[in-house]
């Protein structure tokens, strides 16, 4: 029997629980040593029971600590402390949000939070506002400062630096409920890069599957603001770009990943699509690669191991054919709604092949390559 994965709650829900506990404490309705959890109704109606680790008076208000519980989701913030300080005011300005230690600030347009604001997303803000309303009523003036000290280091493992969120992580969560293995949430976080590139004025984007492609693209002089990491979700990201009226995309990355696209695989995780050597072997065979050499490619452990076989037979032009094929499969995937070009490289960033569309898109984006 498959294990039933345990759910958890988001950093936004942690902050909301902290706000509610702090407000109840200020009203004299909650003991600092209280061992009962705070009840929070998530935005999808789910009832969450969230323990309060500690409550402490500050110079102006109260600060609550909640330990993040991500359940069985591999969330990088699982187990970290989320501190929420609440300060009451009487000026009619409502709720104001501030970033404490480990919470980032937005520096680029295109996100759901305005430039200059703390990166506390709309879902958590709504959840916190609901807690304030529940305890204090409709009209309440409250300063809410959220801190996640571990966020300074954790942010280096997120897309925040790419998205222009500096100083820490974001307080996220659509509803407050964290469902295990949320692939959909990760995909949606990737799409934000497209929104930001479009907000920066780019109608042509560079899609890179990961850090190798990103590093290579920068070395080619391509604009960083137009770079979008796709992870393994190349098809999903192509559709997202087309839905946002992006005019063209340059697929740029290691041949091992993009050869899969040439074979028609648009979700490129190696456990789901691992026909990269078969694709290279097939196209090389179509160009005359002897059967014995085809077998060498099929027996290779990595695509890098297969490259010398192609070179020894003077068939390196097959990489241009593979690139063209990847672009054609991508355009077919999108029903011809967007231009796509492909450029394939080695792990070291050496260009192996590129099609005509890639050269046109790359030149328009200002790359420093000469063909």
Image (cartoon, rainbow, N blue to C red):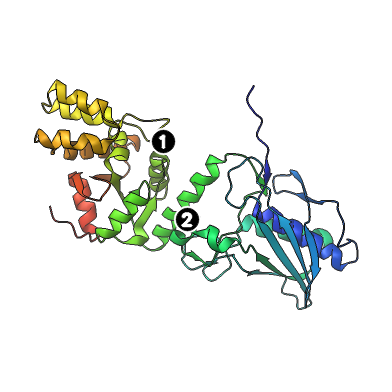
CA distance separating discs 1 and 2: 19 Å
Count how many numbered circles sit on residues in the image.
2
Disc 2 target residue? 159
| Mark sitting on residue 269 | 1
Q: Which quadrant: the N terminus?
A: top right
> Which residue is farthest right?
28
Q: Secondary structure at mark 1?
A: loop
**Which residue is located at x 31 percent, y 61 percent?**
223
The answer to whether residue 211 is above or below residue 236 is below
The x and y percentages for residue 249 are 31, 49
* Callout 2: SS: loop
Q: Are marks 1 and 2 in contact (CB under 8 Å)?
A: no
Picture quadrant of residue 98: bottom right
Q: Is residue 279 left or right of residue 229?
A: left
Q: Camera-side residue: 362 or 300?
A: 300
Relative to 335, is 44 on the left or the right? right
Which residue of the protein is positioned furthest toward the left in this rendering? Answer: 314
Drawn side of residue 153 relative to residue 1, left or right = left
- Asked whether the viewer can see residue 246, the reply is no
Query: In the figure, residue 258 lies in which quadrant?
Result: top left
For mark 1, does the 10 Å Cα neighbourhood hold few (<14), some (14 to 19), or many (20 or more) residues? some
Decide if residue 334 is in sight here: yes
Label 2 crowd bin: few (<14), some (14–19), many (20+), radius 10 Å: some
Looking at marks 1 and 2 on the same chain, the residue that comes earlier in the sequence is marked by 2
């Amino acid at each position: 029997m498959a294990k039933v994965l345990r759910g958890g709650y988001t950093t936004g829900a942690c902050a909301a629980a902290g706000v509610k506990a702090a407000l109840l404490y200020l009203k004299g309705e909650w003991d600092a040593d209280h061992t009962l959890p705070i009840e929070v109704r998530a935005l999808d109606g789910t009832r969450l029971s969230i323990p309060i680790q500690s409550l402490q008076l500050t110079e102006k208000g109260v600060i609550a600590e909640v330990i993040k519980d991500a359940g069985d989701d591999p969330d990088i913030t699982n187990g970290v402390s989320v501190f929420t300080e609440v300060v009451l005011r009487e000026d009619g300005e409502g709720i104001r949000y501030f970033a404490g230690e480990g919470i980032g600030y937005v520096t680029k347009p295109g996100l759901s939070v305005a430039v200059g604001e703390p990166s506390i997303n709309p879902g958590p803000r709504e959840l916190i506002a609901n807690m304030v309303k529940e305890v204090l009523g409709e009209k309440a003036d409250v300063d809410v400062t959220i801190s996640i000290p571990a966020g300074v280091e954790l942010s280096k493992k997120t897309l925040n630096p790419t998205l222009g969120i500096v100083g820490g992580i974001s307080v996220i969560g659509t509803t407050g409920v964290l469902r295990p293995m949320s692939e959909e949430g990760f995909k949606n976080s990737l799409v934000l890069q497209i929104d930001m590139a479009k907000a920066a004025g780019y109608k042509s984007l560079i899609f890179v599957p990961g850090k190798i492609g990103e590093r290579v693209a920068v070395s080619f002089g391509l604009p960083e603001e137009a770079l979008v990491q796709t992870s393994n979700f190349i098809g999903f990201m192509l559709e997202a770009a087309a839905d946002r009226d992006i005019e063209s995309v340059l697929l740029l990355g290691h041949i091992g990943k993009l050869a899969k696209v040439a074979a028609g695989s648009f979700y490129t995780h190696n456990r789901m699509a691992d026909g990269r050597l078969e694709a290279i072997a097939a196209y090389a065979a179509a160009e005359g690669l002897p059967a014995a050499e085809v077998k060498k490619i099929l027996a290779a452990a990595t695509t890098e191991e297969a490259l010398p076989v192609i070179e020894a037979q003077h068939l390196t032009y097959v990489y241009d054919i593979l690139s063209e094929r990847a672009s054609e499969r991508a355009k077919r995937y999108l029903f011809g709604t967007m231009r796509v070009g492909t450029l394939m490289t080695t792990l070291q960033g050496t260009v192996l092949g590129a099609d005509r569309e890639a050269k046109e898109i790359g030149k328009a984006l200002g790359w420093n390559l000469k063909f």
